[in-house]
Amino acid sequence: MASAEPAADGAAAQGEYIVHHLTNLKVGDGFFSLHIDSMFFSIALGLLFIGVMSYVAKRATSDVPGGLQNFVEMIYEFVDGSVKEAFPYVNKVVAPLAMTIFCWIFLMNAMDLVPVDLLPWLASFVGINYLKVVPSTDVNITFGFSLGVMVLVVYYSIKIKGGGGYLKEWLGHPFGYKLFPANLLLNLVEFIAKPVSLALRLFGNMYAGELIFILIALLPWFLQWLLGGPWAIFHILIITLQAFIFMMLTVVYLAMAHEHDEH
Amino acid sequence: MNIGLTLIGQMITFAVLVWFTMKFVWPPLTVAMQERQKKIADGLAAAERASHDLEAAKADAEVALKEARTEAADIVAAATKRGDEIIAQKKGDAEVEGQRVLTQAQAQIEQEQASAREKLRGELAGLATLGASKILNREINADTHASLLDDLAADLGKA
């Protein structure tokens, strides 16, 4: 077992402990590697989300909603309200997309609250030696989300403005057509910045949070709760906020894709 | 096994988190959910009540309409009856009046007939006396022959 005795074995062992916890379970090498743990947990949480939603949807009543339906309706109203505020166009995809992003990312982030050693420890009994349980600390997962959003942004930009209209926006914005190389450059930077910032913001926040949990785990076991407790409580806020930010930015980017700029 | 102890430390941390959630996160959420439930229940009850009220109002309107209809029919019937009565009364009055006028006219006619007859009778008596005096070429004593002349005049009146 690669776990360390933090107090006794010194810095090297602590480093090893940290690295061990930040290593994905993967197959393949380099670009063609697949992070099985991230995939497994993100898909499992996605299925959990789908399962709960369909369970509630199938048993939905127009009468006074019971516990779970009431809870889901509260989330629904919250997401629907946020989307209506930020997205003043007609599009059937945006609200369900926002709901999915919010709930799914929230669930992934929530894995951060599970004790860092619990699932890897359980997994070690079935011979799995590396396990990262928080999918949103995997840059592959967060980029998967943000690139998916960007595909939708491009799709709706072309659908709403037409290929020509979208091209005009790239060339004629913000300085007018005479300065089209500058426009192209600025738009390119903006275009790339969107998915990168979207993905790295979520990844950075969750990775840092996870790292601090790991560092707290290096403390003597009877002191951990002193720091771990407040950090976990603070993390309730962070995981919700990050899921919300990701959702809102997605909605805003899609609203920008629907925007007709008259020049 | 140090990982055991680390894990125990993490489990304590987790317990702190669960305690905090139970103590400070869950109750407001539960309250919000209960409020939402109550709001929906109240809304549904209000809608139910409103639909009941509407039903009752409809029934009331139906009853009022029926009453009004009956009343209107009664009024029309009474008016018709009264009209018939007036007509009948007027008819009776007119008949009586007609009869009266007729009787009066007949009486007048009879009276005039009688007076004409009386007048004629008188004139005839005069004429007869005149005629007879001319035939006899002498004066007849009107006094002595008065009864004779009256008889004649009466006969003529019968003719």
Image (tube, coloured by chain):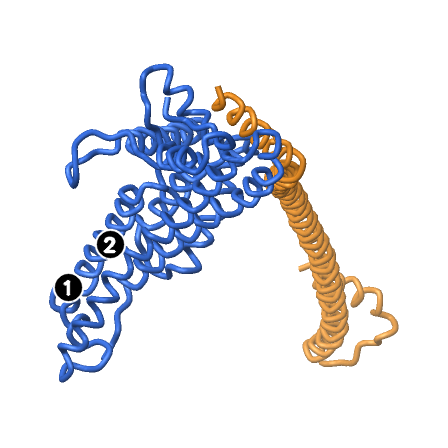
Chain colours: A blue, B orange
Residue B9: x percent and y percent?
Answer: 56, 28
Residue A131 can be seen, yes or no: yes
Mark carried by residue A150? 2
- Which amino acid type corresponds to the residue marked 1 in the rendered image? Gly
Q: What's under tag 2, amino acid-wise?
A: Met
Q: Within 10 Å of the Cα at label 1, are there few (<14), some (14-19), or many (20+) other Cα atoms? A: few
Quarter occupied by residue A125: top left
What is the crowding at mark 2: few (fewer than 14 residues within 10 Å), some, or many (at least 20)?
A: some
Question: Residue A24 appears at what percent x and percent y?
Answer: 30, 33
Horizontal side of A232 relative to A13 (left or right) equals right
A221 or A140, which is in the foreground?
Answer: A221
Residues A190 and A53: in front is: A190
Q: Nearer the viewer, residue A230 or A65?
A: A230
The chain identifier of the residue carrying mark 2 reads A
- Frontmost of labels 1 and 2 is 2
Circle 1 residue: A162
Q: Are marks 1 and 2 in contact (CB under 8 Å)?
A: no
What residue is drawn where x is 26% and y is 66%? Answer: A190
Q: Residue A82 appears in which quarter of the rendering?
A: bottom left
Please report the residue visible at 58 percent of the width from the left and 34 percent of the height from the top. Answer: A224
Q: Are marks 1 and 2 on the same chain?
A: yes
Residue B111 at x, y = what percent? 76, 66
Q: Earlier in the sequence, mark 1 or mark 2?
A: 2
Query: Residue A38 in the image: x percent, y percent?
Result: 31, 34
Q: Vertically, is A190 above or below A106?
A: below
- Label 2: element kind: helix
* Left or right: where A161 falls relative to A6: left
| A10 and A210: which is toward the camera | A10
Q: In the image as oriented, which residue stretches furthest toward the left?
A: A164
Disc 1 and disc 2: Cα gap in Å? 17 Å
**Does residue A153 appear to the left or right of B22 in the view shown?**
left
Task: Work out which residue is located at the far top of the displayed protein and give it.
Answer: A126
